[in-house]
């Protein structure tokens, strides 16, 4: 879907991360590993994780407040909330309902979660685009917030080194000037390889029937090497195609803002596009993989640090459990974060 009946404007962006920092050296207290091993394989030095009662709702709320402020919209202007979350504190009420209540978004606006793991922000943007494009809603708040640290097995050194917690948010609305900020967007999934990253739900059958074999302390399972191979062999061609669908060539795009999962994957995409380092946004060193939040955190922090000059175009690309993946060429106007 490249052309929308009603063009959309990305009106505001925000993020929030927990204060607590856990370094690679800290992880050596949990299992046999080293800063050198983790940094060489992933590009990660440290990650932020929630402490005490802080959770993905708190992080999402703060990110949403920041995005709302930049958009100039008030809670009463929002008419739909979508939360991209695969690691929420509760399965229901949806994280989106918590955000709606906390922000004081009135008039019983629809609020729902969307599970597309680390591709959640791009999936949500496509859904928001469809809803606005069809004329059903006007001002949509997207919140991408994941609290992976509570779902990890902290004895599994192959998986727990990779993730951190964080949230990002985006406000989208119809573009009054008729200029669509989404030049092209493509979302994909392949459930056949769903076992590459999964998390079971606990539970027991009714005591009157035969019991199922269900993991009672569920945790994130990841076949890291399979994910790595799949992503580097599949994603680059979708990046190429999305740029082509936008009517552009790689040189026309100012920045590559990829999902922050592994520095080596980011570099594979960089090489494919033949981009110099200043065109590629990476902050995985300080946050690890924050799932759906990683793209908006990298984007907004990139602007704060002067790595991204707004009034530009960027290609966003993400991948994650499902397996899901997605790409989007977007216009980033001045003042959105
Ligand atoms: O948004 C989610 C997307 N997920 C991803 O993008 C994951 C992509 N994959 C990766 O980033 C990498 O596969 C990892 C960083 C997770 C793992 O790196 P790897 O090079 O694929 O390592 P491996 O799992 O194949 O393990 C290689 C060796 C093993 O030892 P043996 O069997 O060869 O003796 C592991 O036991 O490294 C060992 N190992 C470790 N050693 C020190 C695994 N984890 C660690 C560790 N510290 N933390």
Image (cartoon, rainbow, N blue to C red):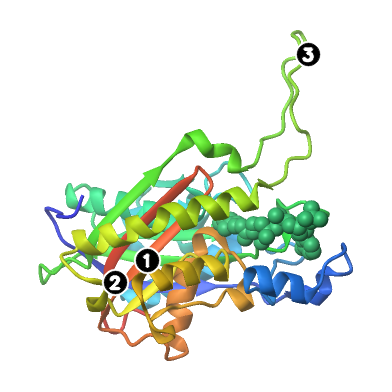
What percent of the width, then of the height, locates residue 156?
79, 53
| Badge number at residue 177 | none
What is the C-alpha distance between the residues marked 2 and 3?
Answer: 52 Å
| Mark 1 crowd level (few <14, some 14–19, many ≥20, 10 Å Cα) | many
| Residue highlighted by disc 3 | 207
- Relative to 156, 175 lies left or right: left
Q: Assign ligand 1 to one image quadrant.
A: bottom right
Q: In this view, does 92 lie above or below 31?
A: above
- Relative to 220, 30 lies left or right: right
| Residue highlighted by disc 1 | 316
Q: Does the residue labelled 3 lie within 8 Å of ligand 1?
A: no
What percent of the width, then of the height, locates residue 133?
18, 52
| Outermost bottom residue | 306
Camera-side residue of 280 and 286: 280
| Badge number at residue 11 | 2
| Mark 2 crowd level (few <14, some 14–19, many ≥20, 10 Å Cα) | many
Is residue 82 in sight in this rendering?
A: no
- Of the image marks 2 and 3, the number of the one nearer the N terminus: 2
């Amino acid at each position: 879907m490249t052309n929308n009946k009603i063009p959309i404007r990305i009106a505001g962006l925000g993020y929030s991360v927990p204060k607590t920092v856990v370094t690679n050296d800290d992880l050596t207290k949990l299992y046999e590993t080293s800063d050198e091993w983790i940094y060489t394989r992933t590009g990660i030095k440290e990650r932020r994780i929630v402490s005490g009662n802080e959770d993905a709702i708190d992080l999402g709320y703060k990110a949403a407040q920041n995005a709302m402020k930049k958009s100039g919209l008030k809670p009463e202007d929002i008419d739909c909330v979508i939360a991209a979350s695969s690691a929420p504190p509760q399965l229901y009420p949806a994280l989106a309902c918590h955000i709606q209540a906390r922000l004081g978004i009135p008039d019983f606006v629809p609020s729902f979660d969307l599970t597309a793991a680390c591709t959640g922000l791009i999936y949500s943007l496509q859904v928001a685009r469809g809803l606005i494009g069809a004329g059903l809603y006007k001002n949509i708040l997207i919140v991408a917030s994941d609290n992976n640290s509570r779902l990890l097995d902290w004895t599994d050194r192959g998986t727990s080194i990779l993730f951190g917690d964080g949230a990002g948010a985006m406000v989208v609305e119809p573009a009054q000037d008729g200029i669509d900020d989404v030049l092209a967007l493509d979302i994909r999934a392949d459930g056949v390889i769903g076992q590459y990253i999964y998390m079971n739900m606990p539970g027991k059958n009714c005591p009157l029937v035969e019991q199922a074999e269900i993991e009672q302390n569920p945790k994130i399972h990841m076949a890291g090497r399979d994910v790595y191979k799949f992503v580097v062999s599949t994603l680059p061609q979708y990046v190429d195609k999305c740029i082509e669908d936008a009517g552009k060539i790689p040189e026309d795009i100012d920045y590559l803002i990829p999902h922050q999962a592994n520095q080596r994957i980011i570099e594979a995409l960089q090489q494919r596009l033949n981009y110099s380092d200043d065109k590629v946004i990476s902050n995985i060193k300080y946050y690890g993989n924050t799932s759906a939040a990683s793209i908006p955190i990298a984007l907004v922090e990139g602007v704060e640090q002067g790595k991204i000059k707004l009034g530009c175009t960027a290609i966003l690309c993400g991948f994650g459990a499902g397996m899901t993946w997605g790409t989007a060429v977007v216009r980033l106007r001045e003042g959105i974060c």
